[in-house]
């Protein structure tokens, strides 16, 4: 079926879907929302002020006379790949899928293959790429002639992971579903890995693969990098980039500070981040790019190419 409905579709009615709806409303982009259950739909309608079609996307597709030309998939991580594949098989030509674009590595690869068969354009919603802090950091990096080295940390705060996700097994994919926000950002700034040595230790019943991570390598731009994370101790997400004149620090990721050569002091970098303050950070620009300049976003094909690196970091090994 060829797409004939010019209205954009949001699939999902949870917090991320609400955030997308608020952005689309501000951008005056017409959209339809399809969710499953009534409780989430009521919360969505109260917070976003937009009606929700309940019953699930498969049922909606069976009853609709036209297929949307664009769709945003903002369902829970376990359903990302299933919903994306359903939309692709019904002929939706352009998708923005919340990170990491599937439940696990195999699921993401499956969605990527489906997108290729359908000749569809699928993009992955790593909204940290669209933070004002990230945009400014890339500008300063370019002015300095590129990245010499970088380091990053993706320690997770375990008390923020819902117990229900641990009991259901969904949290087994927490590294891929959540930590790759930081890893993607670090390699977006410093270049994809060319060589890499990765070590892991520890683990939990709900995430047996690892809980402590460390590694180093060289990116394809020639920059050396290191990383670490310890989910069994204290820490937080962060990325630091060294250029020939300064160290740029994103910690927290929404903020940017720098240390210049010859100084021990850290100075905040002024950011025109009104959009990140008004909406979920990075989302306004991410949606704007999806609608008008999708070439600025991470493609699902590129995400699939990164999965080998994520497997190494998450499980240990040498590239």
Image (tube, rainbow, N blue to C red):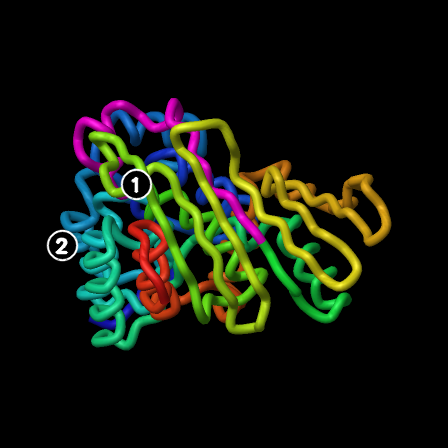
Residue occupying image coordinates x 46% and y 52%:
183
Figure check: 93 above or below 31? below
Residue occupying image coordinates x 34% and y 37%:
211
Figure check: 180 above or below 4? above
Which is more N-terminal, label 1 or label 2?
2
Which quadrant of the view contains residue 179?
top left
Residue occupying image coordinates x 17% and y 39%:
55
Disc 2: which residue: 62
Quadrant in the picture for the C terminus: bottom left
Quadrant in the picture for the N terminus: bottom left
Check residue 210 in the rendering and tell me which mark sits there, or answer none. 1
Residue 77 colored magenta? no
Residue 164 colored magenta? yes
The image position of residue 95, as x and y in percent, is 35, 61
Real-space CA distance between mark 2 and mark 1, rounded to the nearest whole angstrom: 43 Å
For the residue pair 2 and 220, the one nearer the viewer reads as: 220
For the residue pair 227 and 27, the one nearer the viewer reads as: 227
The image position of residue 167, as x and y in percent, is 18, 27
Q: Tell me which segment is drawn in magenta.
A: 151-173
Neighbourhood count class around disc 1 (C-alpha, 10 Å): few under 14, some 14–19, many 20 upward = some
Neighbourhood count class around disc 2 (C-alpha, 10 Å): few under 14, some 14–19, many 20 upward = few
In this rendering, would 285 be left or right of 206?
Answer: right
């Amino acid at each position: 079926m060829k797409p004939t409905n010019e209205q954009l579709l949001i699939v999902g009615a949870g917090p991320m879907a609400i955030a997308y709806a608020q952005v689309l409303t501000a951008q005056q982009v017409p959209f339809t929302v399809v969710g499953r259950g009534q409780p989430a739909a009521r919360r969505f309608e109260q917070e976003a002020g937009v009606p929700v079609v309940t019953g699930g996307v498969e049922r909606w597709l069976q009853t609709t006379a036209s297929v949307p030309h664009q769709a945003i998939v903002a369902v829970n991580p376990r359903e990302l790949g299933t919903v994306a594949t359903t939309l692709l098989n019904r002929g939706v030509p352009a998708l923005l899928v919340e990170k990491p674009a599937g439940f696990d590595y195999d699921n993401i690869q499956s969605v990527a293959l489906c997108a290729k068969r359908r000749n569809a354009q699928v993009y992955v919603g790593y909204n940290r790429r669209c933070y004002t802090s990230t945009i400014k950091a890339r500008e300063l990096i370019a002015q300095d002639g590129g990245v010499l080295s970088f380091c990053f940390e993706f320690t997770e705060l375990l008390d923020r992971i819902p117990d229900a996700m641990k009991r259901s097994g969904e949290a087994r994919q927490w590294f891929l579903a959540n930590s790759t926000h930081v890893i993607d950002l670090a390699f977006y700034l410093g270049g994809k890995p060319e060589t890499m040595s990765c070590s892991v230790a520890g683990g939990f019943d709900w995430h047996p693969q690892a809980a402590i991570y460390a590694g180093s390598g060289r990116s394809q731009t020639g920059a050396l990098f290191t990383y670490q994370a310890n989910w069994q101790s204290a820490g937080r997400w962060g990325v630091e980039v060294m250029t020939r004149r300064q160290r740029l620090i994103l910690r927290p990721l929404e903020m940017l500070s720098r240390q210049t050569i010859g100084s021990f002091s850290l100075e905040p970098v002024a950011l025109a981040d009104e959009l990140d303050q008004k909406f979920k950070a990075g989302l306004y620009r991410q949606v704007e790019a999806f609608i008008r300049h999708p070439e600025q976003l991470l493609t699902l094909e590129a995400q699939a190419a990164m999965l080998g690196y994520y497997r190494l970091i998450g499980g240990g090994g040498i590239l």
